[in-house]
Image: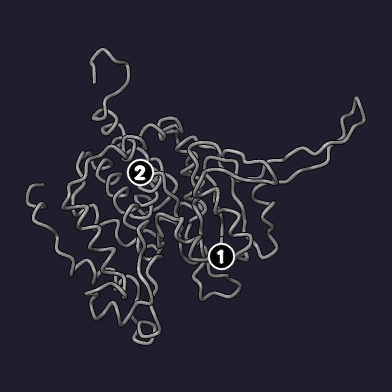
Amino acid sequence: MNEASSEPSDLDSAKFLAGAYVRLQEELGKVIVGQQRVIEELLIAIFARGHCLMQGVPGLAKTLLVSTLAGAMDLSYQRIQFTPDLMPSDITGTDILQEDPETGRRRFEFQKGPIFANLLLADEINRTPPKTQAALLQAMQERQVTVGSRTLNLPEPFFVLATQNPIEQEGTYPLPEAQLDRFMFMVTVHYPSREEELEVLRRTTGALAERVGRVISGGEILRLQEIVRRVPVGDHVFHFVLDIIRMTRPNEPGASDFVRHWLSWGAGPRAGQYMILAGKARALMRGRLMVTIEDIEAVAAPVLRHRIIPNFNAEAEGITVEQIVEKVLTLVPRGKGERLL
C-alpha cells in the first residue's frame, strides 16, 4: 500500500485486531470472571462474520457476557426471550395501522422488531417452536428480513448470539438442522472452577460491578472482517480441513470404522468454510498473518459439535461428540507443509 495513503495497511489492521482482542479481554474481565475460551470463541466468530450458539445450563452468565460484549464493541443491542408463545412477528416486526392526525386517513406502517440491531441475543432459543426459530434463518444467512412484499436490510455489522439450554431439560425444542448450520460455532459454557466461582460470589454480593469501556466500533469491526478474508492460507491447511470434514461422513468411501459405527451423518461443506474463516480470525487475533494447523485444531470442535450427529450406538456406549471430534483430529494427517510454518 502507498505510504501516502491515509488508509491503514493490512499489517496495521492486523496489529489493531490483535490489540483490540487483548483490550476486549481486559474490559470483559471487569464483569465476567474466567470463561477465556468462551470469550475467545465468540470474538473469533464476530471477526469472521459468523453467528454463535452458546450452550450451557442457566445461571452461567451467558446473557451478561453478550450484553457486556455489545457495550465493549459499541454496538446496538437487543435481547429476545424465546418462549413457547413467541411469534415470528415478535422478532421481525409487523405492520401497525396508524391514523394521520391531520388528514384522518389510516395507513399501515411497519414497526421494526428487535432483530434490527447490530447484536441480537436470542435467549434460550430452544424454548420456542421451530416455526418461530425459523424466523431467524433469512436474517442469519442474507442479513435481510422479508415482511410481506418488502425486503429490508439489517444493520451492519449484524450478529446473532443465541443461548440454548441442554436438550435433555424439559420444555425445549431441538433446533432444525438448517437452523443449526447457520451458526458458525456452538460454544459450550461450563461451570466455573472453584477459584472462579469464589470470585463470582465476592463480586456479585458486594459493591456494584465496574462498567466496561468502548474498545472498538461497528465500522472498525466491518473493516477487520474484510482483513480476515484476506489472510493467506496454505494448501496443506486447506487439505487438512478437507480431510477433517470428509472423515466425519459415514457414507464417504474409506470412512473409518468408528465413524460408521458412531455417526448418523457428518459435516457439510459449510463446516469447512467456517473452519477456514475461524482459523484466519484466530491467527490475526494472535498477531499472525498466516493460518497454521494449530489454528484449525483449535476451532474444529466449536465448528463440528453441532454438525455431526451421533447415532444410537454412540449414545448406548456413552460416546460424546467431543470424543468423536478429538478422535478425528488424531487420525487426520497434519501435512508436510506444516514444517514450513
Residue 303 seen in render: yes
Residue 129 in which image quadrant = bottom right
Badge 2 vs badge 1, beta-carbon distance below 8 Å: no
Residue 201 visible in the displayed image = no
* The quarter of the displayed image where residue 100 is located: top right
**Residue at the spot of label 1:** 126
Q: Nearer the viewer, residue 251 or 120?
A: 251
Q: Please tell me which residue lies in front, 190 or 211.
A: 190
Q: Badge 1, how many Cα within 10 Å: few under 14, some, many 20+?
A: many
Locate residue 120, reporting x and y percent: 55, 47
Task: Mark 2 vs mark 1: give the one in front.
Answer: 1
Amino acid type at circle 1 is Asn
Residue 335: x and y, percent?
12, 58
Residue to which mark 2 is pinned:
25
Rendered position, 268 above or below 106: below
Outermost right residue: 104
Query: What secondary structure is marked by label 2?
Result: helix
Image quadrant in which the N terminus is located: top left
Q: Amino acid at mark 2?
A: Gln
When the figure is inspected, residue 252 is found, relative to residue 160, above or below; the finding is below
List x then y, in percent, for residue 97: 83, 41
Instruction: Quote the CA–CA distance across marks 2 and 1.
Output: 29 Å
Look at 49% across and 52% down and name the residue there. Answer: 161
Vertical order, 274 against 172 (above or below): above
Residue furthest top as drawn: 4
Query: What residue is at 37 percent from the left and 66 percent from the top?
Result: 305
Using the image as rendered, state which of residue 108 and residue 318 is in the foreground.
108
The numbered dot on residue 223 is: none
**Residue lying at 58% horizontally and 58% vertically, measured from the top left:** 134
Disc 1 secondary structure class: helix
Image position of 141 (left or right of 192): right
Look at 31% across and 39% down and name the residue there: 228
